[in-house]
DNA sequence: ACTATACTGAACCAGATGGTTCAGTATTCA
DNA sequence: TGAATACTGAACCATCTGGTTCAGTATAGT
């Protein structure tokens, strides 16, 4: 069972709620990068990029280390497991709700749903 | 393969980045509710709750229908499948990165801890 | 008809967000 | 040593956010 706190869900979903930051995660998935690298790629000032990295770091999704002048960013210690778990739990709620609806609508299809719930719509 | 657009990810992750809204989703998972019900439960004005519901509705995660004076809210047409897919893809990137790092870590891990290079500040 | 209920919309507010510029500091390189 | 590089921090700005109050409108109940 995966543990998650409201606070850390807040932090990570907030971090993910921005296309640039999702892009940074994707980029770091392909390899480590400096602030300059990232600022370059996402056409933004160093200062602006550093703020985004700060948000990701705060959420634990990115870790950074400064060596010499260069701060290197990499994927951080926290994976997205708790978030995935939250989503999955709620996806099942969805499914349950709609399964209930299905049975109300018609019981014809219940015979077919043998190996798992049918996706509706 | 699940399809997702940056715009809809923005909308849904933004919607999820608030504890009250996650709570509303959880609540609606247990059954439909009116704006008054939800405002009551989350100790908030009707107007405030309606805004939250609006955000969730915008993201397609909640659907509402007004009958008489009462607007009933239920889980919406969009599930969180695309978001789950996004997370899963990135969880795999994480795993891949750390697998790749394993060999490097074998070499470096002890050196780093021994050298005591502390993170700045 | 009158009153209570349920919502709606406009306006306001403080604080956060996503970006910038500018003026530094620390490091590297020639 | 001196210049270029890489970042950092403060300050500023416009807009968004999460809430409120207040003044409506529409519906339901008596």
Image (cartoon, coloured by chain):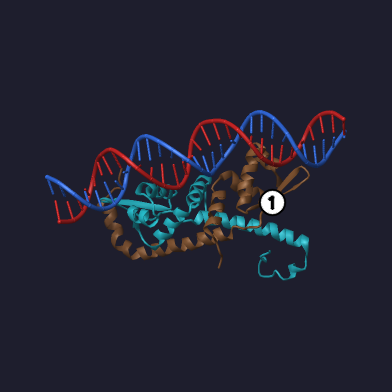
Chain colours: A cyan, B brown, C red, D blue
> Residue A83: x and y, percent?
52, 54
> Residue B18: x and y, percent?
55, 45
Asked whether residue A46 appears in the rendered view, the answer is yes
| Mark 1 lies on residue | B74
* Mark 1 element type: strand
Q: Tell me the quarter of the image containing the N terminus of chain B.
A: bottom right
Q: How many marks?
A: 1
Mark 1: give few (<14), some (14-19) or many (20+) Cα within 10 Å: many
Q: Residue at x 41, y 54 (%)?
A: A77
Q: Tell me the quarter of the image containing the C terminus of chain B.
A: top left
Would you say B10 lies left or right of D9 here?
A: right
Would you say B28 lies left or right of A84 here?
A: right
Q: Residue at x 56, y 64 (%)?
A: B3
Q: Nearer the viewer, residue A42 or A35?
A: A42
Would you say A42 lies left or right of A9 here?
A: left
> Residue B61: x and y, percent?
63, 53
Asked whether residue A1 appears in the rendered view, the answer is no
């Amino acid at each position: 069972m995966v543990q998650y706190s409201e606070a850390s869900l807040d932090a990570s979903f907030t971090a993910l709620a921005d296309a640039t930051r999702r892009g940074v995660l994707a980029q770091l998935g392909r390899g480590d990068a400096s602030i300059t690298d990232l600022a370059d790629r996402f056409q933004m000032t160093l200062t602006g990029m550093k703020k985004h990295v700060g948000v990701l770091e705060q959420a634990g999704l990115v870790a950074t280390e400064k060596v010499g002048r260069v701060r290197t960013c990499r994927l951080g210690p926290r994976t997205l497991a708790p978030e995935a778990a939250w989503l999955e739990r709620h996806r099942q709620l969805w499914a349950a709700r709609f399964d209930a609806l299905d049975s109300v609508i018609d019981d014809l299809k219940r015979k077919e749903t043998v190996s798992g719930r049918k996706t509706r719509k």
